[in-house]
Amino acid sequence: MDVLAKEALLIRLQSYLNELDTIAENATCDEIDRFSIVAELAAIKNEVKLESRQIKTALDLFKETFEVLRQAYTQLEISSNKQREQEIKLRQESERSLLMDLLELRDRLQAGHEHLSNYSPNWLARWNNSSKYVAGIAEGQTMLLRRLDEILARRSIQPLQVTGKKFDPVTMHAIQAVSDSNIEDGIVVSEIRTGFLYHNQLLRPAEVTVNKIASA
C-alpha cells in the first residue's frame, strides 16, 4: 500500500473516531439531563407529600378547634337558659307573697260585693233611700273588682274554672258536699273560694262544694 493510500485511510479513521466521541458526549448529556429531571420530580413529589400532610394536620386542628368552640357555645347557651329560668323562678317566688296578699284583698272585696248584692232593704231603708247608697257602694266594689282582676291578668294570673267540672284534688279542695241525684257524682256544684293559676302553675287551689251520691 502506497503512502497516499495510508494517509487517506488514517484520515478516515480519525474522522470516524471523532464522530464516536461526539456521539458519546451527547449520550452522556442526555442521561445527565434525564437524571436531573427525575431527581427534581422526586423532590417535588416529596414536597407535595409534605405540604399535603401539613394541610391535613391543619384541617384536623381546625376541626378540633371548631368542635371545642361548638361545645363551648352549646354549654354557654345551656348555662344562659338555666340562669334565665332561675331568674324567672326567683322573680315569680318573690312576687308570690305579694300576689297572695292581693288575692286575699280580692276575696274580701268579693265577699263584700256579694253581701251588698244580696242586701234586701226593709221599710226603713226604703223610706230614707239608703238602698240607693248601698247600691252605689256595690257598684263601686264592682269597679274595684274589675280593676283588680285586670291587674292580676297582667301578672299572668287567671282564675280556675271549676263549677260544673269533675273534682280535681290537685287544683281543688272539697270544703262541702251535697247529694243531688240529678247531678253526676264528683261534679263541682259551686265555688266557695276562687282558685288561681300563675303562669299556668297553681297559685292557690279552689275551695268548692262537690256532689257526692251515697253508694247503695
Image: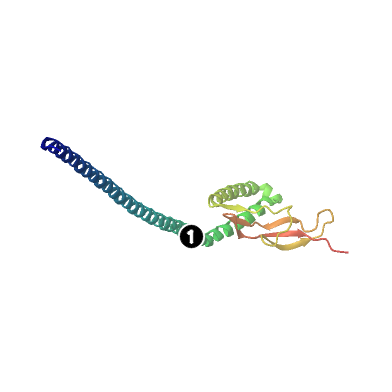
Would you say 114 lies left or right of 41 here? right
* Picture quadrant of residue 4: top left
Q: Name the foreground residue: 115 vs 188.
A: 188
- Type of residue at label 1? Lys
Would you say 139 lies left or right of 79 here? right
Image location (x, y in percent) of residue 65: 39, 56
Residue under circle 1?
A: 82
Q: Name the foreground residue: 6 vs 99.
A: 6
Image location (x, y in percent) of residue 210: 75, 59
Image location (x, y in percent) of residue 204: 61, 60
User: Which color scheme is applied?
Assistant: rainbow
Q: Is residue 215 above or below residue 10?
A: below
Which residue occupies the extreme front position in the image?
A: 1
Seen at 67% across and 50% down, the residue is: 117
Q: Is residue 189 above or below residue 216?
A: above
Which residue occupies the extreme left position in the image?
A: 3
Q: Name the foreground residue: 140 vs 106.
A: 106
- Quadrant location of the C terminus in the rendered image: bottom right
Secondary structure under tag 1 reads: helix
* Picture quadrant of residue 11: top left
Which residue occupies the extreme right position in the image?
A: 216
| Label 1 Cα neighbours within 10 Å, binned few <14 / some 14-19 / many ≥20 | few
Seen at 36% across and 54% down, the residue is: 53
- Quadrant location of the N terminus in the rendered image: top left
Would you say 62 lies left or right of 133 here? left
Image location (x, y in percent) of residue 10: 15, 40
Would you say 21 lies left or right of 98 here? left
Circle count: 1
Q: Name the foreground residue: 151 vs 200.
A: 200
